[in-house]
Amino acid sequence: MKFNVNDLVRKNIQSLKPYSSARHEFEGEASVFLDANENAFGSTLHENFNRYPDPLQWQLKFQLAKIKGVPAENIFIGNGSDEVIDLAYRIFCNPAKDNVIICPPTYGMYEVSGNINDVEIRKVNLTENFQLNVEGIMQACDANTKLLFICSPNNPTGNNLNRADIEWLLNNFNGMVIIDEAYINYSAQKSFIAELTEYNNLIVMQTLSKAWGLAALRLGLCFASLDIINLFNKVKPPYNINQASQQLGFEALQQTLQVNEWIRVTVEEREKLSEQLQGFLFVEKIYKSDSNFILIKVKDANKLYHYLCTQAVVVRKRNTEPLCEECIRITVGTPEENSRLIELLKKYKD
Ligand SMILES: *Cc1c(COP(=O)(O)O)cnc(C)c1O
């Protein structure tokens, strides 16, 4: 990389003196805590819920470090990936001045978060076969381009983006490259976490909301160099991950066998569902998926969507996204749910 990451950081963030919480300042052993104005008697719910949680979630991070094969210091945990995205904007992008690049059709939060932060969004659509338009991305950049969001496997298209394209961009894009790997567990693609030491402009996002089955706990993961992680820690709200999520997340991370089994069945069901969908005349295209959902192009997306709604099955309309005309995104469910969907489609009159 030809540039210094610190030069990309907003001046006010570079000079920010972060809030120092009671839990942060005291690091020794103590048995009497009179430093944080907590309720010393306890909580009616759980023995430690009266205390502020660990601001840096070390227990959870050490467990993640073992699973992911990265040092715990290189992990940041957000209140969902959405917090990681928002913090990236706040760390790197000056409102009303800087811009970022996204590659539609893709995850909606990159744009919403940019709009909230008053940061210009430059859209460089994926190619017809849902791959990165590398040349277009480079042409869209200027001196104020700070971030490039790459989602792989991509939502809503479901496919992996070519690794060589991403590597080329990591080497040539003069800003931070944020690779969102929310669906990496369902893909044969290798995670970019293994490349953290190679690129100082790389931020990898993952989440416990999908394969790990913890969407309700809001645990978004971010992997990056120590310098970048320190910036996230500096800007985040002091107790962004609540104690219940920290504890339950830690427990859930012990259950790798269960999670791997879910992943195996989901991938199996995905392939089966893709095959079965090919049998319907109103299905015009089934896109190859490396995730836990399938994008299909149908004759009339609105009509199919409403039909399924009347049968109490909800899928996601994506037909207003670029390159996704008449497209519907279907999450792979349990074998029973998938069978039910197929049975309903057999009765559908297009
Ligand atoms: C589901 C999803 C996430 C996860 O968001 P959380 O806030 O962690 O639940 C992130 N990125 C993409 C592309 C997703 O589809």
Image (tube, grey):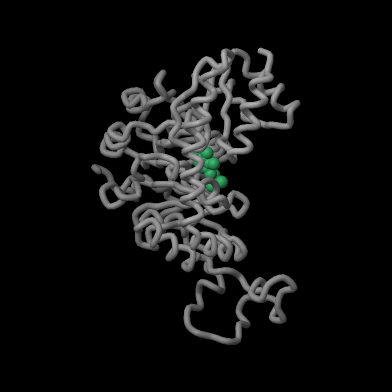
In the image, residue 276 above or below residue 235: above
Quadrant (top left, top right, bottom left, bottom right) of the C terminus = top right
Quadrant (top left, top right, bottom left, bottom right) of the N terminus = top left
Q: Looking at the image, which residue is at 40% across and 36% down? A: 148
Q: Position of residue 46 (x, y in %)?
A: 68, 72
**For this rendering, which residue is in front, 32 or 161?**
161
Q: Position of residue 172 (x, y in %)?
A: 27, 35
In the image, residue 6 above or below residue 122: below
Q: Is residue 139 left or right of residue 86?
A: left
Q: Position of residue 294 (x, y in %)?
A: 52, 30
**For this rendering, which residue is in front, 225 or 348?**
348
Q: How many marks?
A: 0
Q: Looking at the image, which residue is at 54% across and 54% down? A: 219
**For this rendering, which residue is in front, 155 or 261?**
261
In the image, residue 41 above or below residue 292: below
Q: Looking at the image, which residue is at 39% across and 33% down? A: 160
**For this rendering, which residue is in front, 195 or 26?**
195
Residue lying farthest to the bottom in this orientation: 31
Q: Position of residue 259 (x, y in %)?
A: 50, 52
In the image, residue 280 above or below residue 331: above
Q: Looking at the image, which residue is at 26% across and 48% down? A: 198
User: Can residue 65 be seen here?
Assistant: yes
Q: Is residue 173 left or right of residue 331?
A: left
User: Can residue 82 be seen here?
Assistant: no
